[in-house]
Amino acid sequence: MHIDRLTLHHFRNLHGLEIRPAPGLNLIAGPNGHGKSNLLESLHFLALAHSARTRKDKDLIAWGEDSFVIRGEGHSGERAHVQSVEYREGGSRVKVEGLESRRLGDLLGHFLLVAFTPEDLDLLRGGPQERRRFLDVLLCQHDPATLDVLRRYRGALKQRNAVLRWNLRAEEEALLDAYEATLAEAGADIIRRRLEWVSKLAPKASDFYREIGSPEGQKGEVLDMRVTGAPEASGDLVLLRESLLTRLREKRSQDRETGLTSVGPHRDDLLTFLDGKTVRDFASQGQKRSVALALKLAAARLLEETSGLPPILILDDVFAELDPGRRERFGALIAGRGQAFIATPRREDIPFAVESVVNMERGKAS
C-alpha cells in the first residue's frame, strides 16, 4: 500500500505542492517550521479523516483562504486507488474512486496508515479519551462500518444526557428506556470490537516492547493491557448488551443528578502494565516512549495481517526522541516494511538508507 502522487492546495502553509514519493522509505528534510510536519499531517488527514495535531479542522486552512484540497493517487496491492478531500467550513467534498460524498468518514479504510509522533506519549500520560481514540481509529481502518456504530452510540448518548436533565413524569420514562436500548446495542458492539482487537494487539505490543526496550540478551519487562469497564473475558454480544443495559438502568437516578451518562464505552479506558504495574503511574519516560512505539508497531502489524498489506507509516521527528540503542532497534523494525514518510531536521538521526528525499523550505518541496 503506497501513495505515488500527493498534491496539496492551501493546506496550512502548503499550496501548489506536488510530490511523487518512492514506495519505500521517504525522508522529509528541512529546517523546523518550513512544512515537514504539515506535509505528514496532510497524509494523516487524507487517510484517517482527521488531524493528529488539532481537533479544529478549520485550523488546517491556509490563512486568508476558505478551503483546502488534498489528493492522493497510489496503489493498494496491485489495484490503483485515488481519493481526495476538499474541506471548507460548513461542508466538505470527498471523492473516492470518482464517487463523491459529503462524509469525511468515507476516506477511511482505503489508504491504511499509522502515525508516530512526539505526542505519542499522550497515549500513556494523557486522559482516557486519547487511548479510546487510538483504538477506535484502528477499528475504523479495519472496518469503516465501525464509524457508523460510533456515530449511533454518540447520538443516543447525547439524547440520553439531554433527557436526564428534564423533569420527566413517570409515564415519560419510556423515552429514557428507548435511548438506553440504543446505547446498550451500539455500546455492546463497540465494547466487543475493542476487546477483540486488544486481545490481538496485546501480545504483539509485548513482543515489540521487548525488541525496542531491551538490549540484546537482557531480560525485558512484560507488557500487558486490558480494557476497563467491560465484563472480564466477555466477547458475547448478547451478554455485553444485557450487562450494559442493566448498568444504565441502575445508574439512572445517579445520572439525573449530574445530567451525564456515567457508564458505557465512552467512559472506558485502555490500561497498560509493565510487570503488573501501570505504565502511566510507574514507568520512566524511556519506558513510556518504548511502550507507545510498541503500541503503534503492533497496530501497524495487525492492520497488515488483516488487510494483507503493510500500512503507510508516518514518523514525525521520532528518532530524535530516542537514545541510540532504541533508535537502532526501532529503525530495524520499520525498514523494509512498505512505504514510510520520515520527517527530521537531522539526517544523522535516521539509522538506515532511504529511497527518496523531499527537501522542504518555506512550504515548497524539492
Image (spheres, helix red, strand yellow):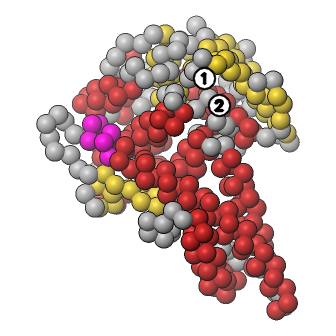
Q: Quadrant of the N terminus?
A: top right
The residue lying at 23 percent from left, 50 percent from top is 221
Task: Give the labeled residue for mark 2.
Answer: 110
Identity, as a three-letter code, of the amino acid under mark 1: Ser
Residue 76 image label: 1
Q: Horizontally, is 41 left or right of 98 in the view?
A: left
The residue lying at 38 percent from left, 50 percent from top is 202
Q: Position of residue 204 (x, y in %)?
A: 37, 43
Identity, as a three-letter code, of the amino acid under mark 2: His
Q: Main secondary structure of the magenta part?
A: helix
Q: Quadrant location of residue 160?
A: bottom right
Q: Quadrant of the C terminus?
A: top right
* Residues rendered magenta in the picture: 206-212
The residue lying at 64 percent from left, 76 percent from top is 245
Q: Which of the pair 211/129 is nearer the observer? A: 211
Q: Position of residue 262 (x, y in %)?
A: 61, 74
